[in-house]
Image (cartoon, rainbow, N blue to C red):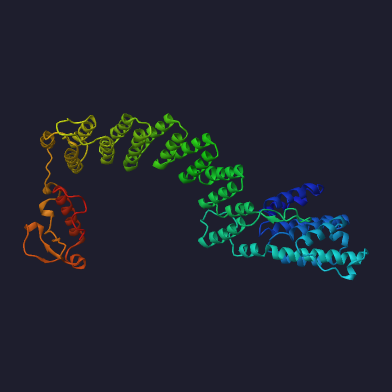
Amino acid sequence: LWPLSGAPAPRHWADEPERVRGLFERALQYVGSDYAADGIWDKYIAYESAVAEAAAADMGRVSALYARVLALPLRLHDVYWARFAEFAATRTASELLAAESEAALASFLTRQGAHPVTTEEMRGEDEGARKLRVYALLEARYHFYVAFHAPRRALEEPIRRRYYHVAPLPAAELAAWRRLLSWGAAQPTGHVCDPLEPMAEVLPSFTYERCLLPGASVRSLWKEYALFLEGKGAVEDARGVLARASGVFFRDCAPMLLYHAQFEEAHGGLDAARALCAATCALPPPAIDAYLAAANLERRAGNTDGMRAAFAAAVDALRGEPLAALVRHAAAVERKLCGDHARGVALIESAIAREPANELLWDAALECATSAVVPAAAGAGDSPAYQAAAALLERMIAADSPLPPPARRRAWLRYQRLVDDYAGSVDAMRALKRSRDEAGLELTLDSEVPESAVPKPLPKRKPNGMSVDVSMGGGAAQPSPSPQQAQAQYTPEQLAQYQQYYAQYYQQQGYGQGYYPQQ
């Protein structure tokens, strides 16, 4: 685009050469070191050549442009040298290199170990000797940069897409860019102190900026760029990179907004981090990670009220399993960090009021209620924590409970376990049965899986490799079928029904899940 932008400038500003040069210099500042920047350099060299010819002036400006471009890792580096060699054949030594720059260039090449051998013909001060000496210095400089930029040019050459496109960057292209970035990040930053081109250096930040043109949709590239700048101590530059990412390219991407929020928090920008968390929470659909990030930020900042406000906003926004996971976490924070068990219970109750049929919410409430329950000694009576847990389970199994029948039956089994483990009186078991009867629960296998839907059960496997059909109450021992035989004999639906049947059977017999064999 820059060559197209600069093309009409010489015609429109024919009487303002400095204005035209300003446009070209601005272009070189942004893209002059790009591997494919030959277009803008060609325009600039052509313009200076035309101006010098029209004014019958010397070609010093043209020589200076050739010196600058020959210090950069462009794809046409060798072509520019061939053009310069042809150009130099008809120019004086002063046009090729100013007298005051000759000593500086010789000193630079000596430091780099690239100074050419000085012959007898070069020792004089006449025009012929000086031109030979200047040309030898410029040629040695060219060969120095050929070797200096060889690793970079080898990594640049395979890259094809160097422009922005909405289509994702192909994996091969992304891999090529990553190789270039890895190489650039390992190079020492700073100038090589070339007197003819002060900007001749390895610039990893420019490489990242170039990579973000074709890779703007690759989130990890923005993060790597910010980490690179942060590692160099350029925190404000890293902040600017993340602001571009989260404010332009990924403004609807929760992970990028939250990453930016973490960066701001790490560098003292709490207000900016809060704003980013708020923007993440406002994204549809509501995400639990956004609300947890907002709440945890306030917790780390010591703002308990802000943390609770984030939890309350999450209860209003989330639904289903994410809502249950969040209130479970929030209740644990209130209990363990703030010492306010009642507030955690109230938060879960507010969630249950919004989704009364969500069994996971009741599970979270039960976990919160039983967290403080301890076994009671005989005759000591039930503790307030036990009574609260029992009251919650009574609500879950009640006839008017919003939970579906399967969930109510599961709640009754938990109620039975609570009584077994923590009740302080033998009367509790009778009360449990009375509660079950009042709730109208039928805890039989038939109530969960109709008898007509239960095929002949698979035999239960014994340790000695023999088996007994549990549905027959014992019987003759017979070899257990192999998994292959079972799969051949029964359909997947039948095998699933068997697994459900045995799970319910052994659960009601008081065994834990996993007691019955997987086969």
Is residue 82 left or right of 232 when viewed as pictured? right
On the image, the x and y values in percent for residue 285 come to 40, 42
Is residue 303 left or right of 117 when viewed as pictured? left
Q: Is residue 495 above or below residue 263?
A: below
Q: Is residue 102 above or below residue 323?
A: below
On the image, the x and y values in percent for residue 396 come to 20, 36
On the image, the x and y values in percent for residue 244 come to 56, 44
Residue furthest to the bottom in view is 120
Is residue 181 left or right of 56 when viewed as pictured? left
Residue 59 appears in the rendering: no
Is residue 168 left or right of 352 when viewed as pictured? right
Q: Is residue 459 above or below residue 269?
A: below
Q: In front here: 410 or 282?
A: 410
Q: In front here: 63 or 484?
A: 484
Please identify the quarter of the rendering in which residue 464 is found. bottom left
Q: Which quadrant would the C terminus be assigned to in this image?
A: bottom left
Please identify the quarter of the rendering in which residue 74 is found. bottom right
On the image, the x and y values in percent for residue 360 come to 28, 41
Q: Residue at x 10, y 52 (%)?
A: 451
Figure label count:
0
